[in-house]
Amino acid sequence: MSYLPIKQLLQSTTTGHEVTVKGWVRTKRESKNAIFIALNDGSTINNIQAVAEPGQFSEDLIKLVTTGACVAITGQLVESLGSGQSVEVKAANIHIYGPADPEKYPLQPKRHSLEFLREIAHLRPRTNTFSAILRIRHALAFAVNKYFNDNGFFYLHTPIITASDAEGAGEMFRVTTLDLDNLPRTEEGKINFSEDFFGREANLTVSGQLEGELGALALGKIYTFGPTFRAENSNTTRHLAEFWMIEPEMAFYELEDNMNLAEDFVKYVIRYALENCADDLAFLENRLKEEEKTKKKEEQSDMSLLEKLRFVVDNDFQRLTYTEAIDILVNSKPAKKGQFQFEVKWGIDLQSEHERYLVEKHFKKPVILTNYPREIKAFYMKQDEESSASPGPTVRAMDVLFPGIGEIIGGSQREDDLDKLMARIHEIGIEPEGLWWYLETRKFGSAPHAGFGLGFERLVLFVTGMGNIRDVIPFPRTPKSAEF
Ligand code: 4AD
Ligand code: MG
């Protein structure tokens, strides 16, 4: 039996031939003259309608056609008389692959809360909202690979298990095969990792950057796109313990080139979604409009989802230094009225409330902040020349801040001067022995280079207009939650 995805069938321009549709029943509606079955196979947000005549099939069979059941329906593809679809299937045969007891099936043909759906992550891809998000997620991932491929970057697969802490924040998950009930100890009583699988301590990677730098200093332009892990106890709508990160790294790029690339890249992938996910985005936009109606007038967004996305791709991002941003924040209304939860002064790590004030209230567009204080950034960032423009030493860092999200990209030009890098490593107290391989690139043929990391789920969050990062990854991992 031939079988076409529903997406293709709905685009059919010819009718009259026999087709088979397969998928999960969304709804069944019985009227005096007909039984309408809405079927979805995940290929598109749109259902295909199959129509049967009352009495055409046994009652026992029709009883099994319930929301959630998996069925195959064969029949003629005909023009639809109903509104909402151009073609439908005149059912001649119904085969039940798997029934779904309506008393027990958790998904009903109504809107469920996102919180409830999080508890049934194994079934939520069958809802309109999640299938739309997952298709958009796919399109964005594809666009990422396409952008880099078309622009001469090589996809470098950096390791998941590493010995180093790239960000130096101590937020790593340990990987071990040691018997936790009976840990081998050294004479000093420390855990003896030389008896562990790798003969040393090992962790899940927090970033592929350090290995990415090795790649850039050999292949020129590379990117990584893989899972990264952070054992940070942040229970927010923007943090996951396991998230996917895209990290390009480019030889001969300086901070300015890095900013240009980040802006061009992020606009490209959003434009790709606008051009290739129109149906799914329209569905999510309507969903958001409904949600907005339940909010107070002053909290309602003045732009629809599509307007927000177009606004980002059509406008230049605002670029300014950290020092200039602090100036703006210190003189802002919320700072003067004491409305920020965290005090603003030069040297602080900007909180999401500060980032969102700059983006949403002050500039009203995406912002790229540069030249952050050295003390709040990672060891590998290139140190700026001392200047009277800032109250303390800064590095050639850049963060891209987005409306509704805050930081979506973090990056920098890298320190390529071995002496400066070593001095910084000693200052911070990192053990250089573990980084010998990284340091060799500065010893042998060092070159200016730069790169950044885009949190993939934060991008999907922005493009789908969803409010919680747990809802844009199929199986979210957060503190005290990794059910599947
Ligand atoms: O700013 P981060 O920590 O930078 C790095 O890891 C660098 N090594 C990147 C580089 O230069 N190659 O993380 C980069 C981005 C953030 O801007 C954010 O979008 C995302 O990764 N991110 C997270 N996303 C979800 N959950 C978390 N816990 C995240 N932590 C960072
Ligand atoms: Mg960061």
Image (spheres, rainbow, N blue to C red):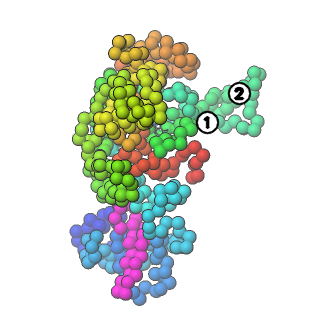
Q: Position of residue 470 (x, y in %)?
A: 48, 49
- Residue 245 picture location, percent across and down: 44, 38
Q: In this rendering, would 408 be left or right of 273?
A: right
* Mark 2, residue position: 192
Regarding residue 380, the answer to whether it shows in the image is no
Segment tinted magenta in the rendering: 23-47
Q: Which image quarter: residue 45?
A: bottom left
Label at residue 399: none
Disc 1 under 8 Å from ligand 1? The reply is no
- Residue at 31%, 44% (x, y): give it: 270
Q: CA distance from mark 1 to mark 2?
A: 14 Å
Q: Which residue is mark 1?
A: 175
Q: Amino acid at mark 2?
A: Asn
The residue nearer to you, when weighing 243 against 328, is 328
Q: Quadrant of the N terminus?
A: bottom left
- Secondary element type, mark 2: loop
Residue nearest the observer in this picture, 78 or 428: 428
